[in-house]
Image: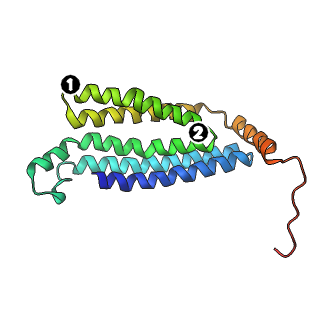
Amino acid sequence: STNLFGWQIMVFFGFNAAISVRVSNELGAGRPRAARFAIAVVLMSSVAIGVGFFVAVLLLRDVYGAPFTESPEVVHAVASLGVVFAFTLLLNSVQPVLSGVAVGAGWQWLVAYINLGCYYGVGIPVGYMIAFPLRRGIQGMWGGMLTGVGLQTVILIAITMRTDWNKEASEASSRIRQWGGGGGASPRIPDSF
């Protein structure tokens, strides 16, 4: 299951980088509609892929461990984690993309605080409570971290949906003029290029 998770997360880290660059470029160019469109496209794509992984794991959870071991106990243990693993794959198809949107919009500090709060403030305590007092073991710890990722995803969805992208594009243009020295004449490109 960690191999599948690793393969899947690499795809969505790529989406994270791509949407981060795309959002920052579109906002910097003063095109908020293009930024919104790019966000919608990458979210629909990532959700579709995530749902595919989710369904595949749920359908194959009883046999997923069989190619990797001959122990029926291990196959059963892997099957018992199937639902939690399926939800992990689903949430991890959306959360990196939303983090990329936030970074592209220049909200790195906000993403850092959301990560800290959701993982350390919510995920670990909930995981501890489920794993030890409720005696759910690995399912509890994984469920707690899944709770943290789920909360982070909900918060980032709310922020993304409530954002005034026209205002963000205006602020990006203002920062470009302020930091980029946009008040002077553009440099002349030599004719030899």
Residue at 18% from the left image edge and 58% from the top image edge: 68
Direction from residue 159 to residue 154 in the image, left or right: left
Query: What amino acid type is highlighted by mark number 2?
Result: Gln
Of 11 and 41, which appears nearest the observer? 11
Q: Residue 98 at what x, y percent from top left?
A: 52, 41
Task: Look at the numbered discs 1 and 2 and tell me whether their residues touch, using CB distance below 8 Å.
Answer: no
Within-10-Å neighbours for mark 2: few <14, some 14–19, many 20+? some
Identify whether 16 is placed above or below 133: below
The type of colouring in the image is: rainbow
Q: Secondary structure at mark 2?
A: helix
Q: Residue 134 at what x, y percent from top left?
A: 20, 25
Q: Residue 29 at what x, y percent from top left?
A: 74, 49
Q: Secondary structure at mark 1?
A: loop
Of 62 and 17, which appears nearest the observer? 17
Residue linked to disc 1: 134
Direction from residue 89 to residue 185 in the image, left or right: right
Q: What is the spatial separation of the Cα atoms under label 1 and label 2, in whole angstroms?
A: 36 Å
Direction from residue 90 to residue 187 in the image, left or right: right
What quarter of the picture does the C terminus occupy? Answer: bottom right
Identify whether 166 is placed above or below 89: above
Within-10-Å neighbours for mark 1: few <14, some 14–19, many 20+? few
Residue linked to disc 2: 108
Q: Quadrant of residue 135?
A: top left
Residue positioned most to the bottom: 192
Q: Residue 48 at what x, y percent from top left?
A: 43, 49
Query: What amino acid type is highlighted by mark number 1?
Result: Leu
Q: Pick whichever of labels 1 and 2 is earlier in the sequence.
A: 2
Residue at 19% from the left image edge and 41% from the top image edge: 80
